[in-house]
Image (cartoon, grey):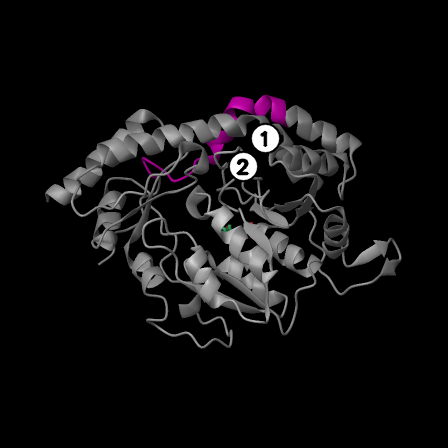
Amino acid sequence: MSSPEPKRYRVPSKDYGRQYAPFMDELMVEVERVLREEDPILGASVERFESEFAAWCGATHGIGTGSGTDAIYVALRALGIGPGDEVVTQANTFVATVTAIALTGARPVLVDPDHVTMSMTAAALGSALSPRTRAVIPVHLYGRLAPMDEIAGVCERAQVAIVEDAAQAHGARDAQGRAAGSFGAAGCFSFHPSKLLGAFGDGGILVTKDGDLAGRARRLRHLGKRTKYDVEDVAPNTKLDTLQAAILRMKLPFVERWIARHRAVAAIYARELQGAGDLVLPATTAEHAHVHHLFVVRTRRRDDLRAHLREAGINAGLHYPRPPHLQAMGIDWPYEAGSFPVAEELASTVLSLPISHELSDAEIDHVCRSVWRFFAS
Ligand SMILES: Cc1ncc(COP(=O)(O)O)c(C=O)c1O
């Protein structure tokens, strides 16, 4: 029997009240200014935020969208991808990656991730390519940079575009300082409130260094309009809201500090949970390459551990308990249970321990002690 949800978690996965508290007064002043001075649709804050965020990622153009899912969809459409095409992504991704591909009319092709890093591998990607492949979407899952040089090598040889799903990896960088979102033709981010940089609602952005692609993406997020009264595509209306852009602009200067705190929390977990039961900790990698948006451990006793933590007032999440190919999404796939053994094993063993810059050392300590108590019982 599953235990009842505590009314209020002692260690929540996110606490937005706490997150906004340090700059609430400043934010309210800015919100009032925006309400008085700016256009509600594509107001000045949107363009400012788009340029600031793109520059932070090492890209040139930013096109704000209504969500991260829409950013991926718009990027694929801007690359001319549609029915008859194939787009490869990884089988353990959040379902939205697959949804965005399917919405274009293209066929999502999945590959099993690496068992240790949980990322796409160049080898698996290479064997999934076909003459119909037009793009590849590596996912920087949980905040860890996918092996972009290897993936880019495969894509270059096959002449297929890369669209990065960087929804969970704001600020992750490789050894040369290249940021998530800056490797492919386009990099797509989510500003879902739970993300490292989150809006107060839905939002997303695609960043690119390609001016032509940026122009097409701008049209495709706005009903395919070339000018106010000229429409040249069937496309959604999915723009980043002015108020969300203003909130995101205020938060952007804090993100590096928040990433540092995520890394510090991850280091505490890695140190304190070593050797607890059959727990598998996230594989280590260069610090700059992982922003630890999520801290995902694995155990065969996942559901029992999660219930035990809930009893202790700890909200541990599941990212994700059922992979896209086992969802009843209506995609005409040749896949079935067993098609992606690694992704399927991950789905039954992954558990996300609370991680957020708002959490105190005492709260993290409570999580560690509770995990040890579980394995001791
Ligand atoms: C890996 C991944 N891809 C895509 C998305 C979609 O983003 P959104 O929820 O903003 O549509 C998310 C976020 O939820 C995500 O985690």
Left or right side of 52 for 39: right
| Nearer-the-camera pick, 204 or 309 | 204
Residue at (82% x, 57% y) in the render: 225
* Residue 277: quadrant of the picture: top left
* Residue 49: quadrant of the picture: top right
Residue at (77% x, 54% y) in the render: 219
Residue 29 in the image: state x and y as whole percent: 67, 24
Q: Is residue 358 visible?
A: no
Residue at (33% x, 61% y) in the render: 342
Which numbered marker is on residue 252? 1
Which quarter of the rendered picture does the C terminus lie within? top left
Bounds of the magenta segment: 9-27
How many numbered circles does the render carry? 2
Residue on which disc 2 sits: 197
Lower position in the chain sequence, tag 2 or tag 1: 2
Residue 18 is one of the magenta-drawn residues: yes
| Nearer-the-camera pick, 252 or 163 | 163
Residue 28 in the image: state x and y as whole percent: 63, 27
Which numbered marker is on residue 63? none
How crowded is the residue under tag 1: few (<14 C-alpha within 10 Å), some, or many (20+)?
Answer: some
Whether the residues at callouts 2 and 1 have beta carbons within 8 Å, the answer is yes
* Residue at the outermost right position: 229
Left or right side of 124 for 368: left
| Amino acid type at image mark 2 | Leu
Q: Is residue 24 above or below residue 10?
A: above
| Nearer-the-camera pick, 67 or 52 | 52
Q: Is residue 65 above or below residue 224?
A: above
Q: Is residue 223 visible?
A: yes
Residue 154 in the image: state x and y as whole percent: 52, 57
Left or right side of 61 for 178: left
| Amino acid type at image mark 1 | Leu
